[in-house]
Structures are given as structure tokens and as C-alpha cells.
Image: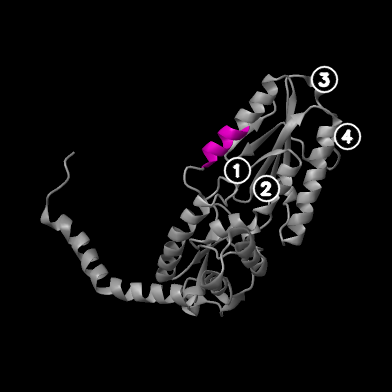
Amino acid sequence: MKPSTSPNDAVPSKIIKDVFDSIGPSIQVILNSCLTRGFVPASFKQAVVQPLLKKHNLDAKCPRNYRPISKLPFISKILEKVVLSQLLPFLNQAEILEPFQSGFRSRHSTETALLKVKNDLLLTLDSGENAILILLDLSAAFDTVDHNTLLSRLEQWVGISSTALQWFSSYLTNRSFTVSIGQFSSPSAPVSCGVPQGSILGPVLFCLYILPPGNIIRKHNIAFHFYADDSQLYLPLKSADSLQTLLDCLEEVKVWLGSNFLQINNDKTEVIIFGPSKSKTPRTADLGILSPYVKSHSRNLGVIFDSNF
């Protein structure tokens, strides 16, 4: 099909251009002022939360069946987009982001994460060893991020300082929200923790917040892969020492999470043991605290993994 050449097709783009030409310079002045002063206006930090039923057949009277959709002012998202366009190139050039974090990054998807993990597991099985995979999920991770800890992480791990750090401090603090249902709205309430829901910068800031666990896991020589707040830990089961190393690593990660206001969701923890040799498969009792979570198959980033591959 050939593109239409009707004059009417040019009307929307012309209107957009005229509007942009008229208000663009004013928006630019506002954004530049925010960046040079290290300040985010309070009006940019007021979110409107609208509950959305997760599935049409769920009980509409049960609050747990709703997903809170947070809406922020349009101009605030433009400001965040400008900051992100400067932050991401710096993070990539300085190689600050966790190499095995696939969430919210260009050319890092669920597909690349799954290919990496599955390939590593298959290589272990091809060598004649069994392997164990642990799937971990954090409880309301984005909502429990501590602002002071995040600012410290930005300063000490990322190297952000001066006006830029002041801007992030203003961005995170003194935020508020109201809940809107139909024609009714709740009074405004403060948001004292968490990365802003519905924001442009929130996902990247969360990835920076959880940088330390990667070093903890590497210290124990255990393979891993993150996707946002989903974590996968896996290693060959060569001996009882391998299993103890994994348990020690998990304990240290849990301690770090607790000291950083995060917690593993035990209801979503799952363990799968892969292996060509059933004689080498550890008994459930040998898995210690992991034994209740052993499954024959599990959904991993949308794909079913089973113990026989």
C-alpha cells in the first residue's frame, strides 16, 4: 500500500508542530531551571492513583484484586526523560549497571535472560553434573526502597554529586498521591518511601538500589541473573559443599535485603533440580530451608522450566 497524499493527513502533524513551537520554548525554560537549580516542583510530584481490576472476572469488592495505576503530570515525565537521556549513557560508559541485570535496559530482555540461564544449565548437564536453580521474588520491592539509602547509593556507587545529587534528592522527597475512583478523590497523602510508581526514572533507580547483591553472590562463586526484582541463582551440584555454599549465599543476601528494607516473597520462591543422573540428585532433607520450595516445573519469566528440560 502506498502512503496517502491527502492534504488532511498533514493537518495533525502541522497542529502538533504549531503547538510545540508555541509552548516548547517555555517548557525548555522550566526544565532547564529545574536542572540547574537541582529542584523538582511539588506539582510535578503529585500522583493520581486509579485502581484497575486485574481481571474482569475477579470480585470487584475485594481491594486485593485491583492494580494501582499511578499517573504523573505530563511535563514531569518530560523532565524525567531528559534526565534519563543523560543518566543512561553515563551508566553504560562507566559500566556501573549490573551486567546480569536484564530489566529496563536496551538489548537486555526476558529472552536474553532466559537464553543465558538455560544455556548455562545445559552446559552443566552436558558435563554430567546436576544443577539447581532457585527463583526468588521480592515483596513489593519498588514500594519499599528507602530514599536515604538510594541517595547514598547514587553518591557512593554511581558517583553522582553536587547539583545532580540535590536534584535526585528533591525528586524523591516530599512526594504525594491521591486516589481517584470515578468522580471521587481521596485527600492527598505523603509518599515516604519507594521509587515513584508510573515514573520514567523509577525502574533504573531500583536497579541502582540493588547493585550490592550481585557482588555478594559473585563472592560465593554462584551464577545468577536478575530481571528487575526477580532473581535466579544457579550452580552445579558437585557435592554437599556446593549446596552449603548456596545456603550460605542465600543467608547473606537475606541479611542484606533486611538491612535495606527489602524482603524475599517466600510464596513465590521455587527450586528446580536438573540432572541426567538421578543417583546424584540430593535428597529433599539435604536441601535444608529450600526443601519446601522444590518443584518439578516452574514458570520462569513467562516460560515453563521443568526438571527434565
Three-letter code, disc 2: Gly
Determine the secondary structure under disc 2: helix
In the image, taking residue 4 as reference, residue 163 lies left or right, namely right
Location of mark 3 (residue): 279
Q: Which residue is pictured at 65% across the width and 24% down the height?
A: 123
Q: Is residue 178 visible?
A: no
State yes or no: discs 1 and 2 in contact (Cβ < 8 Å). Answer: yes
Return the disc, 3 or 2, that comes first in the chain's sequence: 2
Location of mark 1 (residue): 100
Three-letter code, disc 3: Ser
Return the disc, 4 or 1, that comes first in the chain's sequence: 1
Depth check, mark 3 against mark 2: the one in front is: 2
In the image, taking residue 78 as reference, residue 177 lies left or right, namely right
Cα distance, mark 4 to mark 2?
28 Å
Q: Is residue 187 above or below residue 115?
A: below
Q: Which residues are magenta?
A: 109-117
Residue 89 pos. (x, y %):
46, 54
Return the disc, 3 or 4, that comes first in the chain's sequence: 3
Determine the secondary structure under disc 1: loop
Residue 183 pos. (x, y %):
46, 75
Location of mark 4 (residue): 285
Badge number at residue 214: 2
Q: Residues within 10 Å of mark 4 (few under 14, many from 20)?
A: few
